[in-house]
Image (tube, helix red, strand yellow):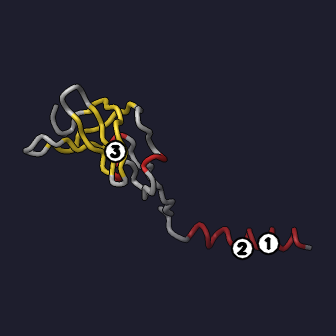
Amino acid sequence: MKTGDIIKGKITAIKPYGAFVKIDEEVSGLIHISEFSHRYVRDIEDYVSVGDTLDLRVIDIDDSGKVSLSFKALHHKKKRYRIRLKTGFEPLRKRLSTWISKHNQNSE
């Protein structure tokens, strides 16, 4: 196992700061609360329960063998797209008089 690997793990305990995960008979890891979602997480139990099996990404293995895991790394944040006018305001200026006249006709 190395950083970047995707592994399966079973939640064995939940604490306010994270969830402990059993990866295999010899290796355990931790999903820190900040690694559950791209948004604020108030309660980890809103995401997982003891006994759940999850796909997780290994984000770090320190020198002592502690494994840090991430749930959110496999669940990409949805991109928000902004609409941009490529032609500037000229089309608006051209259409404005038409919209105003239609509005005046409908309100009469």
In front of the other: label 3 or label 2? 3
In this rendering, is residue 29 above or below 44?
Answer: above
User: Real-space Cα distance between discs 1 and 2?
Assistant: 6 Å
Earlier sequence position, callout 3 versus callout 2: 3
Does residue 34 appear in this view? Answer: no
Circle 1: element type: helix
Give x and y (percent) for residue 14: 37, 45
**Camera-side residue: 11 or 71?**
11
Give x and y (percent) for residue 25: 22, 25
The residue drawn where x is 54% and y is 71% is 89
The residue drawn where x is 46% and y is 46% is 45
Question: Quick check: marks 3 and 2 in contact, CB under 8 Å?
Answer: no
- Please state which amino acid type lies under the numbered disc 1: Ser
The N terminus: image quadrant: top left
The residue drawn where x is 79% and y is 72% is 101
**Camera-side residue: 41 or 104?**
41
Does residue 45 appear in this view? Answer: yes
Return the residue found at the far top: 25
Return the residue found at the far right: 108
Q: Which residue is mark 2?
A: 97
- Please state which amino acid type lies under the numbered disc 3: Ala
Density class for disc 3 (Cα within 10 Å; few <14, some 14-19, many ≥20) is: many
User: Real-space Cα distance between discs 3 and 1?
Assistant: 62 Å
Q: Which residue is mark 1?
A: 101
In front of the other: label 3 or label 1? 3
Circle 2: element type: helix
Residue 69 horizontal side relative to residue 51, left or right: left
Residue 66 horizontal side relative to residue 46, left or right: left
Circle 3: element type: strand
Q: Which residue is mark 3?
A: 19
Question: Quick check: marks 1 and 2 in contact, CB under 8 Å?
Answer: yes
In this rendering, is residue 87 above or below 45?
Answer: below
